[in-house]
Image: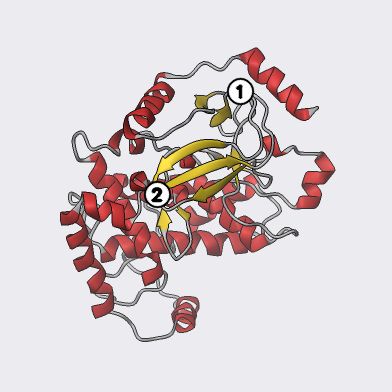
């Protein structure tokens, strides 16, 4: 009944694509992304204002979208396209190991807790300690740098896709402002706004998660001396910080410690009850219907495997990472929130 009602409303309001939607599909056709059963639409009928919808009735097991592997933005593909950037990034990463503090990770967090002084600047240029960033986080700076390089390159095949990336939520606003992790006033203000979105979260837990991400971004930015070839540590570019926030919100882990952004896949919104699954045959990724899907339904995949019971740490992470207010399951059942209305991240 819910799907029938949703489809009726969807068809009643209309399914006209914007110019950007049409241009994106034209780009997909040009580069070899097959979307025989899918249409990207900017519409209030999407849970996020823009989503991918079913074109016609689709049977369970049907491939809905097919994406060649070489189009996926990950370190290997990006390095092939930008070998000069890859060489520079390797040099930048080496600074971490030269200056690496030998303390164990728990010691670094203990230092964070005990350190009471305020730095004149959050990243003391003479301080080689890294409280937040580790080598596991380098991919975030690397892919941010490659994404900026794409936008600075005329006629690169990724440019029409990356130029449409967008994020608008309270965490992204903090990234773009370049807020320091220890700027209590600015951080508390941002945490309050995030807490208003999901009041079930502890403010202290939320603040710690926000500080961790702000501190990590600034440490990576300092280590890399800016994320793009035109940025520096003395001039902290808003474009650098904006791209970092957008990139990290669109990237997904695809196993074997590979983090990447996949075109069209990144346009699909999140739900705890997805209707698409991802398959890989060595050359192409296929998004396949997990059940029968009716014409006009929005496609969803699950951004992160969720436990059966609500977890506050995971909920805080999802809110900060994607802007999605993952409510306690018992609250969703109490107000009968549908899967269609569950996601909220803006793409």
Q: Can residue 133 be seen at all in this image of the molecule?
A: no
Gap in Å between the C-alphas at discs 1 and 2?
A: 27 Å
Could you tell me which secondary element the residue under label 1 belongs to?
loop
Q: How was this image coloured?
A: secondary structure
Q: Nearer the viewer, mark 1 or mark 2?
A: 2
Left-right relation of 321 to 328: left
Location of the N terminus (image quadrant): top right
Proximity of marks 1 and 2: CB atoms separated by less than 8 Å: no
Left-right relation of 152 to 253: left
Q: Residues within 10 Å of mark 2 (few under 14, many from 20)?
A: few
Q: Residue under circle 1?
A: 56
Q: Residue under circle 2?
A: 283
Which residue is situated farthest in the left direction here? 84
x, y percent for residue 215 = 41, 63
x, y percent for residue 229 = 18, 51
Q: Residues within 10 Å of mark 1 (few under 14, many from 20)?
A: some
First reached walking from the N terminus: tag 1 or tag 2: 1
x, y percent for residue 15 = 56, 17
| Picture quadrant of residue 314 | bottom right
The structure residue drawn at horizontal position 56% and vertical position 39%, both measured from the top left corner, is: 269
Which residue is situated farthest in the right direction here? 334
The structure residue drawn at horizontal position 74% and vertical position 37%, both measured from the top left corner, is: 338
**In front here: 233 or 69?**
69
x, y percent for residue 236 = 27, 52
The disc at residue 315 is none
Left-right relation of 302 to 156: right
Q: Can residue 345 be seen at all in this image of the molecule?
A: yes
The structure residue drawn at horizontal position 43% and vertical position 62%, both measured from the top left corner, is: 181
Q: How many marks?
A: 2
Could you tell me which secondary element the residue under label 2 belongs to?
loop
Residue 66 lies, with reference to residue 120, above or below; the image says above
Left-right relation of 168 to 332: left
């Amino acid at each position: 009944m819910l799907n029938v009602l949703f489809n009726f409303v969807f068809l009643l309001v209309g399914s006209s694509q914007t110019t950007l939607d049409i241009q994106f599909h034209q780009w997909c056709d040009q580069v070899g992304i097959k979307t025989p059963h899918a249409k990207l639409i900017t519409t209030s009928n999407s849970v996020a204002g823009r989503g991918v919808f079913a074109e016609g009735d689709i049977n369970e097991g049907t491939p809905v979208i097919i994406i060649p592997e070489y189009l996926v933005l990950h370190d290997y593909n990006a390095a092939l396209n930008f070998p000069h950037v890859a060489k520079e990034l390797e040099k930048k990463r080496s600074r971490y190991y030269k200056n690496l503090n030998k303390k164990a990770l728990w010691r670094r967090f203990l230092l964070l807790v005990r350190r009471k002084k305020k730095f004149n600047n959050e990243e003391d240029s003479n301080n080689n300690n890294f409280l937040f960033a580790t080598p596991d986080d380098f991919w975030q700076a690397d892919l941010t740098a490659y994404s900026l390089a794409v936008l600075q390159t005329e006629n690169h095949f990724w440019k029409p896709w990356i130029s449409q990336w967008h994020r608008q939520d309270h965490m992204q606003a903090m990234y773009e402002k370049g807020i320091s992790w220890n700027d209590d006033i600015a951080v508390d203000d941002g945490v309050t706004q995030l807490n208003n979105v999901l009041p079930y979260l502890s403010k202290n837990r939320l603040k710690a998660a926000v500080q961790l991400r702000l501190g990590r971004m600034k440490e990576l930015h300092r280590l890399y001396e800016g994320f793009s070839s035109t940025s520096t540590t003395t001039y902290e570019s808003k474009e650098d910080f904006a791209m970092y926030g957008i990139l990290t919100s669109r990237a997904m882990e695809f196993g074997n410690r590979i983090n990447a952004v996949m075109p069209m896949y990144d346009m699909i919104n999140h739900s705890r009850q997805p209707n698409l699954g991802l398959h890989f045959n060595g050359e192409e990724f296929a998004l396949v219907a997990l059940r029968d899907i009716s014409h006009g339904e929005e496609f969803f995949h699950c951004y992160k495997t969720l436990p059966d019971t609500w977890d506050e740490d995971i909920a805080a992470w999802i809110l900060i990472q994607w802007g999605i207010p993952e409510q306690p399951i018992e609250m969703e059942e109490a107000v009968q929130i549908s899967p269609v209305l569950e996601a909220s991240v803006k793409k």
